[in-house]
Amino acid sequence: MAAKGRQRGGRPLRRQAEKRLELRTIVVFCEGRNSEPDYINGLKKLAHIAENTALSIHIHPDHGVPLTLVRRAVEYNKDPEVDEMLVPFDVEWPLNHPNLAQAVNLAQSNDTNLAISNPCFEIWLMLHHQACGAFMDTESAERLSRRLDGRPGKSIDAETYMPMRKKAARHAERLDVRHDQNGTVFPHDNPSSGMYTFLWSLEGKG
């Protein structure tokens, strides 16, 4: 009989456990119930991400605005088991969400990451299919996004987006470079999406 606390072959179980990599824990607070969580869940299913990252999604029950989401994330960030917080949110046009500057300042002062899409998350989805350079309002972005992937509503098939995610990230990064060169600052950086910075942090720039 093998000694207690040892596997067949004589290796201590404790030493085996010590070699396992601890998962990086990221909690994502979403304002919507459809496209954003669908997309994050698609990332969760990628084997190389699942091996080293635990992504947890929290959806605001009342379709929270950015400042509400950031406040909830800051409160949750007190949990010592959480490594990183992420709040993806939309700017919206022609009528912006309220208190955008306060939301950004609160996140920056409380170690909470943001992934802001301007005017909306559908810009990030569009960038998987094509580069986008023209100012867009929310309704136009949603309509074009649905036309590009053929979906009838807000829910997306994330698996169809995963193979194109790094192309989208490159497109989004180029938009940020263009806005920087033009001196265009938030919330006037339309179109744009900070989702690419989250993607690079998950799996490296490529």
Image: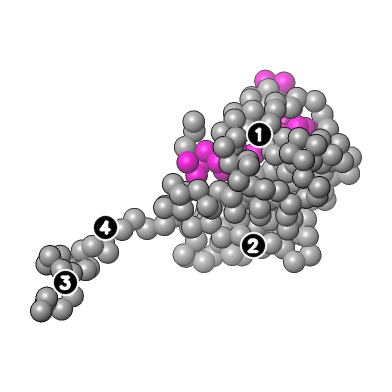
Compute the Cα span from label 3 to label 4: 15 Å
Compute the Cα span from label 2 to label 3: 40 Å
- Please give the range of residues in magenta: 181-203
- Mark 4 highlights which residue? 19
| Above/below status of 11 relative to 83 | below
| Above/below status of 157 relative to 126 | below
On screen, residue 173 versus residue 5, left or right, reads: right
Residue depicted at x 73% and y 58%: 33
- Mark 1 highlights which residue? 128
The numbered mark, 1 or 3, whose residue comes first in the sequence reads: 3
Q: Are marks 2 and 1 in contact (CB under 8 Å)?
A: no
- The kind of residue on which mark 3 rests is Arg
Crowding at mark 4 (Cα within 10 Å: few <14, some 14-19, many 20+): few
**Which label was assigned to residue 48?**
none
Crowding at mark 1 (Cα within 10 Å: few <14, some 14-19, many 20+): many
Count up the numbered dots: 4
- Mark 3 highlights which residue? 6
On screen, residue 92 versus residue 126, left or right, reads: right
- Mark 2 highlights which residue? 58
The residue tagged with tag 4: helix, strand or loop? helix
Tell whether position 189 is magenta: yes
